[in-house]
Image (spheres, rainbow, N blue to C red):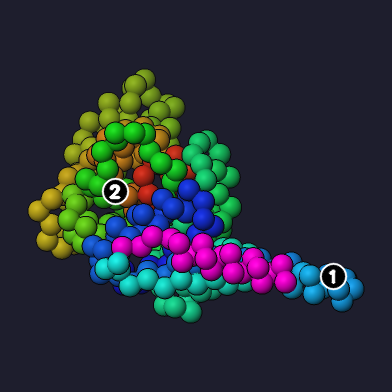
Amino acid sequence: MFQSILVGTDFSEDAARALTVTCRWADALAADVTLVHVRTPLGDLDLDPPMLASLAAYQEMLAERVRAQLDALVVPPALRAQRVSLVAESAAAGLVAHAGVCGADLIAVGSHGRGALARLLTGSVADRVTRMASCPVLVVPPSESAGEAKGRAVIAPVDFSGGSRAGASVAASLARALGLRLVLLHVVDPTGHPAFYISDKHSVSEAFPNLKARCRHKMGELLATLGPDSHTEIVVAEGREHVKIAEIAAEHGAEAVVMSSKGLGGGVAGMLGSITAKVLGTARCPVLVVGA
């Protein structure tokens, strides 16, 4: 499982939530933590020497303030944590590059919203990191509703593609490591099936009575490849995929939803699968994006 987790911070509430989840996972996984803040350069400015000197003094003051803020971040004393301040052309590029330098096998970032415009509301840094990183990325959303139970399950949506099977394997390992229940979820989207348009049936399940049983059978075959696990549930639901994934995650008090960066729809380099992108914008729990 994960041995080194890099968590990006801009000292916002979103970043604080990402750090909280990171520390919880790092404690359970005995992983190292690296806290990273990225500043962007001011670029080449045509200034006279006195102004350049003032600018240099301001940048040094800013760097000291960042170091003080990094030092003030609270990490459980039992965790091995490093704190890094660096300068890069963009926050996303800096986080991804430093993950390679320090050997991180997971990057955690906070998002900035939730809603229909999934890509925009995920937050530009989180959105870019998930597209640029070669390792899994954990995106932690804004705080959930008060009193909502969390940390009961890890949700693994499955569309039977190679990517989703890889995601299910990561989800199974994570559930075992955190001592949580694994929920394998397949969503039948009626709008994506011809029967929705050409038959007089009101649902795909009505048009194909054995469909859910066949899906459960295939998911059972997948489960047999994931290793021993006595706390697993198989769920087959019907509805819009990203909406149903978010609903099932909320119902099960999910610690995380584990999604592949690409599903059956495929995609080009640097692009997330459309369902994964939508789940990132709608889920109330952290979403772990893993490579296909």
N-term-proximal mark, 1 vs 2 = 1
Where disc 2 sits, the SS reads strand
**Residue 250 versus residue 200: which sits nearer the camera?**
250
Mark 2, other Cα within 10 Å: few <14 / some 14–19 / many ≥20: many
Q: Residue 51 carries which label?
A: 1
Which residue is label 2 attached to? 255
**Residue 96 versus residue 57: which sits nearer the camera?**
57
Q: How many labels does the image show?
A: 2
Q: Is residue 276 magenta?
A: no
- Classified by dominant secondary structure, the portion drawn in magenta counts as helix
Q: What stretch is highlighted in magenta?
A: 57-76
Inspect the image, locate mark 2, and give the three-letter code of the amino acid beneath it: Glu
Marks 1 and 2 sit apart, C-alpha to C-alpha, by: 51 Å
Residue 133 x, y percent position in the rendering: 49, 66
**Residue 206 versus residue 36: which sits nearer the camera?**
36
Mark 1, other Cα within 10 Å: few <14 / some 14–19 / many ≥20: few
Left or right: 267 in relation to 22: right
Up the image or down, 153 lies above or below 195; here it is below
Which label lies toward us, 1 or 2?
A: 1
Residue 175 picture quarter? bottom left
